[in-house]
Image (cartoon, rainbow, N blue to C red):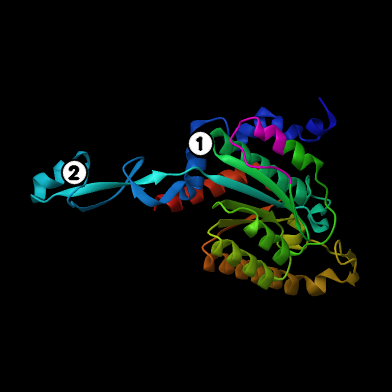
Amino acid sequence: MDHTTESFRRYLDPQVLARIGGLDLRARLLVRGFLSGMHRSPSHGFSVEFAEHRKYAQGDDLRFLDWKVYGRTDKHYIKEYEMESNLQLLLAVDCSESMGYRSAESAWSKFDYATTLAASISYLALRQADSVSLATFDSKTHRTSRGSNNPAKWKSIVHELAAATTVGRTSFRHALDELAESTHERHLIVIISDFLGPIEEIAAGLKHMRYRRHEPLVMQVLDRAEMTFPFKTPTRLVGLEEKDVMRVEPRVMREAYLTALRSFMTELRRRCHDQQADYAAFDTSNAVGGALGTYLAARASRVRR
């Protein structure tokens, strides 16, 4: 086993894949629901899944007359279906320096967790023959792979994620704009980051993606310590991107910090909602399989409704 595969052996472990449900029918159904919104073409046809009835017009194919409706109403209606289109999935993983943070209580850094999410989602998408591509970003976008639905693509994605390092600062506006313009085809763009940056930049980037007809999906990954601020003694905080140093008394600032964080996450969720973008928060202390499975089930349920 080479060094890259060894560093990513957690993805290759069948128990990990089983936890994310990648090996059973239920998971395939979940991911189908997770991705199904992008599989629906904006045009109507006569294949895949029933959408609605419309009145018969001269020249319509009589094979698609609904004879049951005719028997009940004595009127002619055509059954229309939503056509299936190929899904184009782009996974964008934040590789800025702040993603390298890992508290003493956490087994993985935020970047480890983010890359595990990306590897898991790509595995599930490739299982149903969807096209997957990968990009990493900090102050700009690094396109590390082209889209493919070949099952062998998964190993390539794993190697690319393993080779990525957390360096540099984040520029959400620049990176998200580049992602929006990176392809002319409509994509489901899954952005995995801590999103600790100017919320106006993030919102503008999501709006740009929507303008380009992409569907953005925001996955915010935070360390447990960032979410709970468990520090009890005077603490020296060192910025990972700004390089600032601050000495703080946690007992004095904990409540203000947690209030500010909750407010920020609520506003981020609202801005995502404004752009019809899914939002999900992930805590690095939770198992990836359980957290991702819960999210997939919730999204599939929303799609069905």
Tell me how many marks there are: 2
Say which mark, if any, is on residue 223: none
Q: Which residue is drawn at 73% across and 45% down?
A: 144
Mark 1: amino acid: Arg
User: Magenta region, mostly helix, strand or loop?
Assistant: loop
**Frontmost residue, 200 versus 103:** 200
Residue annotated with mark 1: 28
Task: Determine if the magenta segment contains residue 150.
Answer: yes
Task: Determine if the magenta segment contains residue 38.
Answer: no
Mark 2: amino acid: Leu
Say which mark, if any, is on residue 65: 2
**Frontmost residue, 35 versus 220:** 35
Residue at the extreme front: 59
Q: What stretch is highlighted in magenta?
A: 144-157
Which circle's residue, 2 or 1, is located before the other in the chain?
Answer: 1
Q: What element carries label 2?
A: loop
Binning the other alpha carbons within 10 Å of mark 2 as few (below 14), some (14 to 19) or many (20 upward) gives some
Q: What element carries label 1?
A: helix
